[in-house]
Amino acid sequence: MKRADCAATLCKLEVTATAADAEVPVQELFHAVPRDRIGGAAVRRIGEPLGNRVVAYFVRKGHDLPVTE
């Protein structure tokens, strides 16, 4: 499953492996996004044991990732 939500400065991409024992290839997510447009990124693996769900945030150049406290 793939899902993307994008706004003016931030995109959220969720990818879930179809098999329960599969791992989402995080490196492929980063290669799919043009490097000249990214100002920052954050990735979080969810699920045990392999992390079969990944949520990635990409921010456009010239902007910062939101900070949580």
Image (spheres, grey):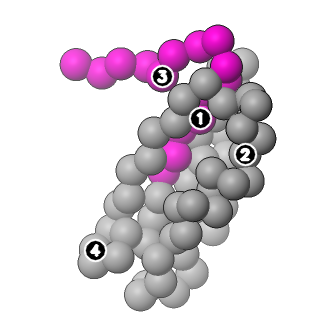
Q: For mark 2, what is the residue?
A: 33
**Residue 28 appears at what percent x and percent y?**
64, 63
Cα distance between the residues tagged 1 and 4: 24 Å
Instruction: Tell me the number on the disc at residue 65.
Output: 3
Instruction: Tell me the number on the disc at residue 69.
Output: none
Q: Amino acid at mark 2?
A: Val
Residue 68, image quadrant: top left
Cα distance between the residues tagged 1 and 2: 9 Å
Visible residue check, residue 10:
no
Instruction: Look at the numbered disc 4 and give the secondary structure of its residue.
Output: loop
Front tag of 2 and 4: 2
Q: Nearer the viewer, residue 56 or 7?
A: 56
Q: For mark 4, what is the residue?
A: 48
Q: Amino acid at mark 4?
A: Glu
Circle 3 crowding by C-alpha within 10 Å: few under 14, some 14–19, many from 20: some
Which residues are drawn in magenta?
A: 55-69
Instruction: Look at the numbered disc 2 and give the secondary structure of its residue.
Output: loop
Q: Amino acid at mark 3?
A: Leu
